[in-house]
Image (spheres, helix red, strand yellow):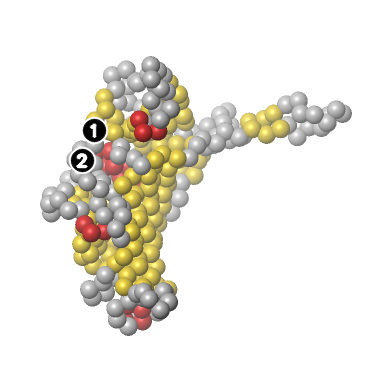
Amino acid sequence: MDSANKQTAVVSEYPGGTTPATPGFKLLRDIRVSGAPDRPATRSPERRSDRMAANMTSGLYTFPKTIELPWARDAGTDVLWDVALCGTWQSNVLKNGSAELWFTLEERYEGGVTDPYRRLTGCRIDTTTISFRNGQPGTVTFGIQAMAETAATSAIAGATYAAPTPGHDPSTPADILVNDCFSISGAKIVNLDMTISNNLRAQHAWGASSPFGIGMGLFDVSGQVQLYFGASTDYSAFMNRQTGRDFSITVGAINAAKDVILLPNCDVWNPDVDDPGATGDHMVTLNFMARYDAGEGCAIKITRNAS
């Protein structure tokens, strides 16, 4: 089956683990969906006089997946961001919280007369990785844990599939305005890698191989920023760990359709300056972690549809 024809869609669940009866799926602009359920089986530990295997046992099932997308926010990614930050959009603002939010992931493969479907239910987002590289489309990658998987040969009766809205071009670093980079004057950023983690765990109990739930752990936002080494303070200011520093960028090229990412209270530490050799530019790499900010009531805030 040709991968070019594959379709990926998501829909919010309530309660978790139950796809709506007539789901309004949101189509995703995914690059790829990778990962596979793990349904382990092992040989029985018993010994036999003929030395051969006669029995097996089944282990605990887990359902990890990874969805990789270009940075282009739409109705489908809004669902994913809700779940990733364990919060809900309030008008156009999303802050991290501790709400238990879920979704169904559906993958449809083009099979000609009969299309195979795979559906993961009870999906939660463990990790979200944001990456921007000069000259390349930004990417956002959602690492998922789910409670179950089913397979089918037809769509769910009554299901609808909404095209990605809006359908703007993906953003590159050329479309990013740096509002504040840890109070560095005139910071010229070239790379950003940021990971948001919920530290999830599958919850298993007697009577079933599949998990009955997905538990949350510590919430963490951390990463690295790389920028041109333009002044001594770009390095020296962070030789001792700094606290209370803002990081804020506006992503997008279309007014009223931009995204603002704000980390209002960051620790920044362990700077490094590279050496490219006889020809090149020195770059500073800074490590950061977002703390809770009392003023914003969160560690990360995303504002959509900004100008």
Residue closest to the eye, 90 or 33: 33
Q: Is 122 drawn above or below residue 73 in the view shown?
A: above
Q: Residue at x 22, y 73 (%)?
A: 186
Mark 2 neighbour class, 10 Å CA radius: few under 14, some 14 to 19, many 20 or more: few
Is 37 left, or right, of 86 in this rendering? right
- Pointer 1: residues within 10 angstroms few (<14), some, or many (20+)? some
Q: Are marks 2 and 1 in contact (CB under 8 Å)?
A: yes
Q: Against 61, is 221 above or below? A: below
Label 2 sits on what residue type? Gly
Residue 40 vs 110, above or below: the answer is below
User: Residue 75 location, x and y as percent?
Assistant: 24, 39
Distance between the Cα atoms at labels 2 and 1? 8 Å
Residue 199 percent coordinates (x, y):
45, 50
Q: Which amino acid type is shown beneath numbered disc 1? A: Ala
Locate residue 156: give its quadrant: top left
Q: Residue furthest right?
A: 49
> Label 1 belongs to which residue?
163
Q: Residue at x 23, y 33 (%)?
A: 163
SS at badge 2: loop
Question: Is residue 137 toward the left or the right of residue 46 in the image?
Answer: left
Q: Position of residue 210 (x, y in %)?
A: 53, 32
Residue at 46% in and 46% down: 200
What residue lies at 26% left-to-right and 74% top-to-bottom? 184
Q: Quadrant for the N terminus, please.
A: top left
Mark 2 — residue? Answer: 167
Asked if residue 53 can be seen in this view, the reply is yes
Residue 234: image x %, image y %? 32, 77
